[in-house]
Image (cartoon, helix red, strand yellow):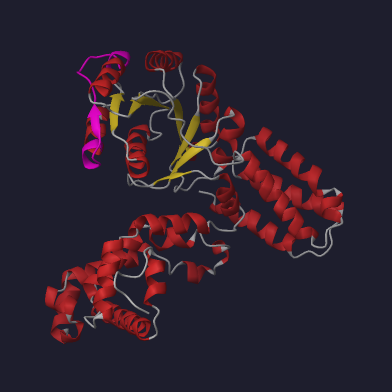
Amino acid sequence: MFDNLTARLARIIRDLGSEARLTEADIDAVLRDVRVSLLEADVALPVVRDLIEHIRARAVGAEVLRSLTPGQAVVKIVRDELIQVLGGTASELRLEGQAPVVVLLAGLQGAGKTTTAAKLGRWLIGRKTRRILLAGCDTYRPAAPEQLKLLAGENGLECFVGAPGQSPVAIASAALQLAHARLAEVLIVDSAGRLHVDEEMMAEIRQLHEVLRPSDTLFVVDSMLGQDAVNAAASFSSSVPLSGIILTKVDGDSRGGAALSVRHVTGVPILFIGTGERVEELAPFHPDRMASRILGMGDVLTLIEQVERGADREKSEQIARKVIKGAGFDLTDFRDQLRRMRSLGGLAGMIEKLPLAQFLPGSAAAQFNDRELVRLESIINSMTPAERGRPEIINGSRKKRIAAGSGTQIQDVNRLLKQFQQMQTVMKRLTRKGGMARMMRTLGSGPPRGFRR
């Protein structure tokens, strides 16, 4: 989301950090560049003005000008002030009161409220082990109830959408009664949206809020809307007491201004960001990590958490036992690791969280293409079980068949086999040199039970 802003700010920060001496004129020049970068990213003007004033007030003081490393001191100030604009510290859902606790989602049509309802339900079950009921109160958008029921069914969530012709308020009341009857711990209500803010929609969301008395009222906003997202957030904030914001589509080609503006305009924290279309792609929002990413410093902590959550301990232990016993790391295991890498956001998603990733040469960045992972998996899927278990039997005629079945060239099959052979060599070295425990920790689990160094 912040690609352009990050590229510009990171270059400014990189050059600044190497400066041994700074004058007030140097700082003024840096702040002009920062201001232009923020405005081009569609950050609201009041936010830019406040941010620049706060940075200037600290940067021209003795804290910087008398520092042994003034450039680095300014970098720290910029990061600190960005963190404050983004909310300071990470905030969580309140989920207060007796069950069922109600979470009401509000926002414009197209922001992704329905998908976000399922994402939030899945996140709560995965983190809090709570029983969730989804309620669909969008009676305007065609197929909205069907979409919510489908998402709920695919993710082990209960769902209530009401009868045709029921008003949103009637559906909400019935859903609340059902949540009590089914002993649900959390009721997530998907409200209706419009293409633009109007009084009818505001009146409806106020009625829902009065009936449901939610613990949390979350504004779901499309980060790609830019300044329009900020205006919509301000309208909803003046109509109902918002407790948090969920930014969706942050993986899209947007300028990022919404993330830096909505917290300032509404005064409520950003709680989650939607990082992709899949239901599991909802992440808690951490202001300090986002500030680091904006400045090109990476987000290694989030990457580590993704790896830990995606780790399949049982599968990792099975692979380790095979290698230790000499059974070998075969192409089926290789395919499983490719799938796991894709579930973590793919190569591109992992690389962007590394520090200064945007400074990779264009030729190097182009190599981190997730389509290559799909192609490798397709080649392996075109093999027979015997070929996946014993790649050495794959001769010329078999390669020709595999290439035809996967829609690739024989050269692609040869490249895969070479990459796999290199990985096998690494696995053998690990077992010989006692590095298996370290590898298992990297995979997100400890060494397999019964393993001795």
The question of residue 154 being in magenta is answered with: yes
Q: Position of residue 149 (x, y in %)?
A: 22, 33
Q: Is residue 375 visible?
A: no
Q: Position of residue 226 (x, y in %)?
A: 53, 37
Q: Write the residue at 84% across / 48% down.
A: 60
Give the vertical position of 144 relative to 153 (above or below).
Answer: above
Q: Is residue 32 visible?
A: yes
Closer to the camera, 163 or 41? 163
Give the vertical position of 85 relative to 108 (above or below).
Answer: below
In the picture, measured across the screen, residue 230 lies left or right of residue 404, that is right
Location of residue 46 (image quadrant): top right
The question of residue 221 being in magenta is answered with: no
Q: Quadrant of the C terminus?
A: bottom left
Q: How many numbered discs, if any?
A: 0
* Region rendered in magenta: 152-171
In the picture, measured across the screen, residue 162 lies left or right of residue 370, that is left
Give the vertical position of 308 relative to 326 (above or below).
Answer: above
Q: Write the residue at 39% across / 15% down.
A: 204
In the picture, measured across the screen, residue 375 lies left or right of residue 16, that is left
Q: Position of residue 186 (x, y in %)?
A: 34, 29
Give the vertical position of 121 relative to 320 (above or below).
Answer: above
Closer to the camera, 74 or 377? 74
Location of residue 185 (image quadrant): top left
Q: Write the residue at 46% across / 59% down.
A: 304
Q: Position of residue 144 (x, y in %)?
A: 27, 29
Closer to the camera, 46 or 448? 448
Q: Write the residue at 59% across / 36% down.
A: 261
